[in-house]
Amino acid sequence: TSEEPYTVFMNGEEWTGGMMNMQWEGQPAWLAYINVASVDETTAKAMELGATVCYEPADIPGIGRFSVFTDPVGATIAVFTGLSECCGDDCGCS
């Protein structure tokens, strides 16, 4: 579980984004999140295909689970699974 503060942006009752301090080298920037069924499986597959992990899979308390990696050509992205999208213990959310 990440101990870093995470700011959530809301549009009415809908969660629309978030912000946290960077934990890796690079320029501060907006980061695209891709919704996936399993953050852990997707991160492992990305590493297998040559990605470099910037932020290991971690929980965002009350929100979901995410990780950040840079693909082999230099694009940095995040993958995310929200708590409401978790389907049992295999998803990794807590």
Image (tube, rainbow, N blue to C red):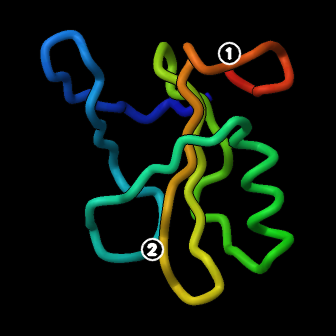
Q: Residue at x 30, y 37 (%)?
A: 18
Residue at x 30%, y 75% (from the top left corner): 27
Residue 20 at x, y = what percent? 33, 43
Q: Check disc 1: other Cα within 10 Å, few if <14, some if 14-19, many if 20+.
A: some
* Residue placed under numbered mark 2 in the picture: 25
Q: Earlier in the sequence, mark 1 or mark 2?
A: 2
Number of residue marks? 2
Q: Position of residue 1 (x, y in %)?
A: 62, 28
Using the rendered view, name the quadrant where residue 90 is placed: top right
Helix, strand or loop status at disc 2 = loop
Provide the residue designation for mark 1: 94
Q: Residue furthest left?
A: 12
- Please give the name of the residue rendered at 57% of the width and 73% of the height, measured from the top-left corner: 70
The residue type indicated by label 1 comes to: Ser
Foreground: disc 1 or disc 2: 1
The image shows residue 67 at horizontal and vertical percentages of 60, 49
Compared to residue 26, the image places residue 20 above or below, namely above
State the CA–CA distance, disc 1 to disc 2.
Answer: 28 Å
The residue carrying pointer 2 sits among few (fewer than 14), some (14 to 19) or many (20 or more) residues within 10 Å by Cα, namely: few
* 51 and 3: which is toward the camera: 51
